[in-house]
Image (spheres, grey):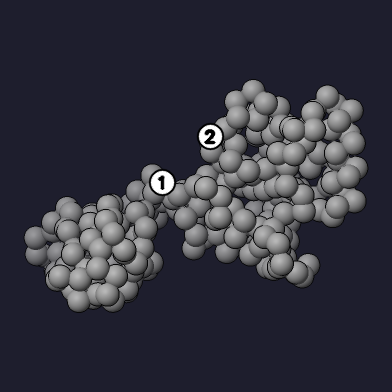
Amino acid sequence: MLEATCILVTVTRTAGSVPREVGAWMTVAADGVTGTVGGGHLEFDAIARARAALAGGELAEEVRYPLGASLGQCCGGVVWLSFKLLQAGDDLASHLSAVNGRPMALFGAGHVGQAIAHIARDLPLALHWIDSREGQFPAAAPARGWRQEVCDPPADAVADLAAGSAVLIMSHNHAEDFDIVAACLRRQREQADLAFIGLIGSRTKWASFRQRLEARGFTETERGWVCCPIGVHGVVGKQPSVIAVAALAQVLALP
């Protein structure tokens, strides 16, 4: 919940070369700014416009900014910004839920899962975070309307994932991981609406899973829908933050 009245500024449309994508946002209060819509003169003007409205001035719902012609920014495209007054006590997450970006399902709230969720707060991703253990999630409220769910067994949550989800699987035990992978493959077989299925683990782990999936009746093509190990090639290191960066880069690179 918001602690003070502020203006929510959101990129609603773009044309040409621009600094930020549709959905980028910032909040402007009398004494601070959170987030960014691209910096430079664009952001300077937006902050000034928002603060003038907070001081009692008129608030335009949407403003068109030709970056080159009116602001002298070298990108030269056009950005449309919306301005919305939010009162203290409003739920910012509910206002941002429609612009969170690609849905991503994260199974597991261990060390790597925690690192992924922490870094993903600043990325255009709408997170559905699932773990079978009570009390595993951080105490702080989820960001931007993200969903945190305790589900035992976690594979049951696969049916409720948003269409187009990128799925990252890293629960605290291999039995859960296997059941989640199998549930994702069944959904992909029936609906073909998951953007990515990634499994944390070694090549040895995947070889074992691949044999078990074959025994369950999954074809070679279906088993090929799973990426294991996860992460972009060339990023080495087993620290949770390194694995998180590599996995998130892989998700962000999806078409």
- In depth, the one of 39 and 142 nearer the eye is 39
Q: Is residue 13 left or right of residue 237?
A: left
In the picture, which quadrant includes the N terminus?
bottom left
Please indicate whether residue 57 sits to the left or right of residue 137 in the image: left
Tell me what residue is drawn at x 60 percent, y 45 percent.
166
Distance between the Cα atoms at labels 2 and 1?
15 Å
Note whether residue 158 is visible: yes
- Name the residue at 38% across, 44% down: 98
Q: Position of residue 164 (x, y in %)?
A: 54, 38
Give the labeled residue for mark 2: 163
Give the residue displayed 27% in from the left and 52% down from the top. 13
Rendered position, 117 above or below 55: above
- Residue drawn at 44 percent across, 50 percent down: 100
Quadrant housing residue 154: top right
Q: Which mark is residue 97?
A: 1
Residue 91's x, y, as percent? 37, 51
Q: Which circle marks residue 133 in the picture?
A: none
Which of 254/161 is in front? 254
In the rendered image of this protein, does residue 144 appear above or below residue 182?
below
225 is higher (above) or lower (below) than 120: above
For mark 2, give the secondary structure.
Answer: loop
Residue 178 left/right relative to 56: right
Mark 2 nearby-residue class (10 Å; few <14, some 14–19, many ≥20) = some
Say which amino acid is labelled 2.
Ala
| Tag 1: amino acid | Ser
- SS for callout 1: helix
